[in-house]
Amino acid sequence: MEIALLPDGLAAGVALLLLLASVLGSMISASLGAGGGLLLIVIMASWMPPAAIIPVHGLVQLGSNCGRAALTWRHVDWKVIAAFAPGVVLGASLGAWLLVDLPAQIWQLTIALFVLFLCWGPKLPKAAIGAPGIVIASAFTSFISLFVGASGPLVAAFIKQIHRDRFSTIATFSTAMALQHAPKALVFGLTGFMLSDWLVLIVAMIGCGFIGTWLGLRLLKAFSDQRFGMVLNLLLTALALRLLWQAAAAGVWW
């Protein structure tokens, strides 16, 4: 297998921009709880071939979230992760089997409305954030993550319903997202994605993401749990409103 330094048609300047975006995205996710992955995929969509965006984004996010989980493992809620893991397998398996091609604006609208409800609606009942509810949420978000790169805000909003401590929120969210991105390597490998063309860039972006995570966790220490919760709510709301705007611009209402 011949491994290219850079994919054909991708300029060195664009590659440098993607590396810097990986640092910034990981720093945002580590300090604010979410948003870095969405920022990264927006930048990718402006410069990369459409067929490469979701596979490359998924693998970079897998590496970045693994690094974040490794640095915060003492704060991970393993009971939540134990319930989240089966849902990942179920959702990813169903998505790989169906390979649906629903319009992106349908997912954007669905994610945005769920995020807004989880941020500003009533607190979910205990049954919804117990093991069965976590499995269902994991399966749903893992399913849609194969087709869009915007499931992170929804997972973050759900984890926020379970934890108020900022370090537990970040650690558990990062571990959950690492699990959710893992099946993408297999799924897109089986569908013929040329990983070797992008491997060097992916590894470099993961390394830059680790640097961003380290910087973001230093910033996280400056927040109180209350301030972190409010900032995370506002950030998730902004991301949800952006998704609603995209869905409206694409004509989802009609």
Image: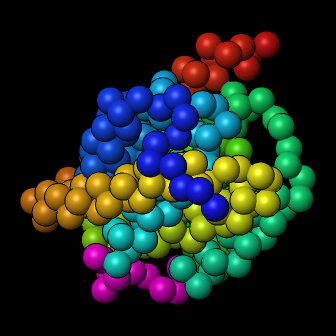
The part of the image, by quadrant, that contains residue 64 is bottom left
- Name the residue at 57% across, 48% down: 197
**Observer able to see residue 199:** yes
The part of the image, by quadrant, that contains residue 167 is bottom left
Percent across and percent down for residue 12 are 35, 33
| Magenta stretch holds residue 77 | yes
* Residue nearest the viewer, comparing 58 with 240: 58
The part of the image, by quadrant, that contains residue 234 is top left
When the figure is inspected, residue 170 is found, relative to residue 115, above or below; the finding is: below
When the figure is inspected, residue 6 is found, relative to residue 139, above or below; the finding is: above
* Residue nearest the viewer, comparing 186 with 112: 186
Compared across the picture, whether 41 is left or right of 126 comes to: left
Residue, far front: 2
Residue span colored magenta: 71-80
| Magenta stretch holds residue 176 | no
- Name the residue at 79% across, 13% down: 254
* Residue nearest the viewer, comparing 191 with 161: 191
Percent across and percent down for residue 62 are 50, 63
